[in-house]
Image (tube, rainbow, N blue to C red):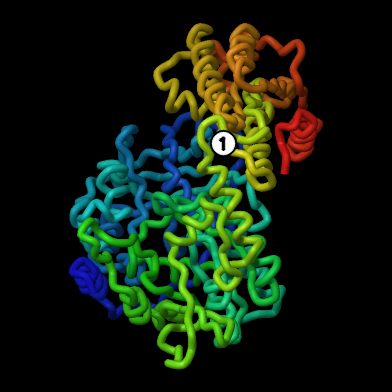
Amino acid sequence: MSKSSSRNTKRNTKATAGRTYPAHGGDLKDLLYAGDSDDLRERIAGAVRIILTPRQLCDLELLLVGGFSPLEGFMDEVTYRSVVDTMRLPGGAVWPMPIVLDQDRVHVAEGDEVVLCDSYNKPLALLQVTSIYKPDKTAEAEGVYGTTDKSHFGVRYLFEKTGSTYIGGPVTGISLPEYFDFTEYRLTPRQLRDRFSERGVSRVVGFQTRNPLHRAHHDLIRRAARDHGALALVHPSVGVTKDGDIDHVTRVKAYKVLHENYLSDIAELSLLPLAMRMGGPREALWHAIIRKNYGCTHFIIGRDHAGPGKNEAGEPFYGDYDAHELVAQYADELGIEVVPMKKVVYVEEKDEFIPEDEVSPNQSIKELSGTEVRRRLLENEDIPEWFSFPEVVSILRKSTRKNNQENGQVGTTRGAVIFFTGLSGSGKTTVARTLAAYILERYNREVTLLDGDVVRENLSKGLTFSKEDRDTNVERIGFVAGEVAKHGGLAICSAIAPYIAAREANRRRVSANGEYIEVYVSTPLETCEARDVKGLYAGARAGNIKNFTGISDPYEEPTDPEIKLDTSAQTPQECVATIVAYLESRALLTE
């Protein structure tokens, strides 16, 4: 065991005399805002907004759906320090990971109500601020990760990406984060527990992963389900994961094909919106608590579970089985049984992966390193079926080729820009995101999504809403999109872009190197205004918001767009079908 792991385990075993772990998460409808829409608009309009980071967005979703039960919000200072020092909440329940809202860019005071928003500025929750405090990041790193070495993924994130102020308080949900990909697999704790009940099972063994699954994982899952008389839950993390991990779209495609063809008889597949910290033993305990909330009675703890790899000296941060030992200490208290899994190897005589310590001297084993697998994928060399399934390998090959093509070398597929324009609230962002998810799921295309609100928060920060600055914002979107198209990519842009001249300038810029498709979302003004939960139209009509398109500033309708949509009469899926048919007719989407 490494020195850092020893410190981690020693600190983590403090205060083990504790309480019974509370019941898992409640029904979603009990957690979301239940007031009337006028009251909600008023509260949102008068509150400070915080745009959540990807990690914070994952944490908020799991708070809202009960995946982080018994937590009801982001941790106040007393709770934070208790968790860092003792792995327990102040009331005594086991909880090993700080769940905090870090901020440097907004100023709030205790007693304030804050609106928590996604990157598209959509309100998701109200936070009642009860605590504002400065963390001791060194103590947090040592307590949670057992090291201050920044080559550890979680430690580096803590010191380099986490804000210097933490804000704590309970949250009230307004809306869950929106997803447009793999929606049938994004099940809440309540939905999963209902599904288990429908299948008539009372024993469920959870399996955590952030990597593609191969034959070894398949055999391990089957063994665990068989040995414990349980249904398996394949529950991969698809939130923020370790730098260099395979993108979640590719991974989920592989999970789906493996589940459908090889595991559907003994397993359910569901996606977990978890931002991993790579915290080794503490993270394994955290994963077990989360899976208890999702209805699992058993949880598989793998070798070096949630380990970040090795430090700069080449030493592992945690021992191979430190996580087994830590979680086992709390298993009875949590009410979930640990299923420890050791290293498995492929045995030719059995045509099966089995634990290394069960191999007899007269049996032959085969191994293939991760480095060698990546090399074979890159070089299009054979990967044997004893190691992985052909359907999984095919998906990984396509992704590897896509991610390693040199600029401009994209076969016969041309680059293109799909530019959505329309009033605020017309539905252009929803359709654009639905389209991006649809293409990523079904086609081997690289997609870049450029939304006007996100661009203003990053690329165009500081611009006003004058005509000149609006044109500059649209020009910047067009420049980035044009570069994507020039190198064979597909850029999907969504912006109000109210002026014809700016849109036509983008058309000329993009058309030199790719195809330009203008999509006019012509939803009527009255529909847009009725949808406006942010209260922007009301503010504009009251004179509080100047230069608001459609009210106090003009919108110049496209005269000859390639595609015209109206989301008051068409669903997002119907709109996407129209666009996809057009793209296929132009040979811009091929299987």
- In the image, residue 290 lies at what x, y percent? 47, 66
Q: Is residue 94 above or below residue 312?
A: below
On the rendered structure, is 300 left or right of 166?
right
Quadrant placement of the C terminus = top right
In the structure shown, which secondary structural element does the residue marked by tag 1 occupy?
helix
Please report the residue visible at 58 percent of the width from the left and 61 percent of the height from the top. Answer: 382
In the rendered image, which quarter is residue 505 located in? top right
Identified by mark 1, the residue type is: Asp
- In the image, residue 361 lies at what x, y percent? 42, 92
On the rendered structure, is 66 left or right of 414?
left
Q: Is residue 477 above or below residue 139?
A: above
Please report the residue visible at 18 percent of the width from the left and 69 percent of the height from the top. Answer: 3
Quadrant placement of the N terminus = bottom left
Please report the residue visible at 45 percent of the width from the left and 89 percent of the height from the top. Answer: 358
Kindly identify which residue carries mark 1.
39
On the rendered structure, is 509 left or right of 305?
right
- In this rendering, the count of numbered labels is 1
Q: Is residue 546 visible?
A: no
Query: In this view of the protein, which residue sits in the foreground, 295 or 265?
Result: 265
Please report the residue visible at 49 percent of the width from the left and 36 percent of the height from the top. Answer: 119
Q: Is residue 126 above or below residue 422?
A: below
Label 1 packing within 10 angstroms: few (<14), some (14-19), many (20+): few
In the rendered image, which quarter is residue 512 located in? top right
Q: Is residue 494 visible?
A: yes
- In the image, residue 55 lies at what x, y percent? 42, 48
- In the image, residue 307 lies at what x, y percent? 35, 64
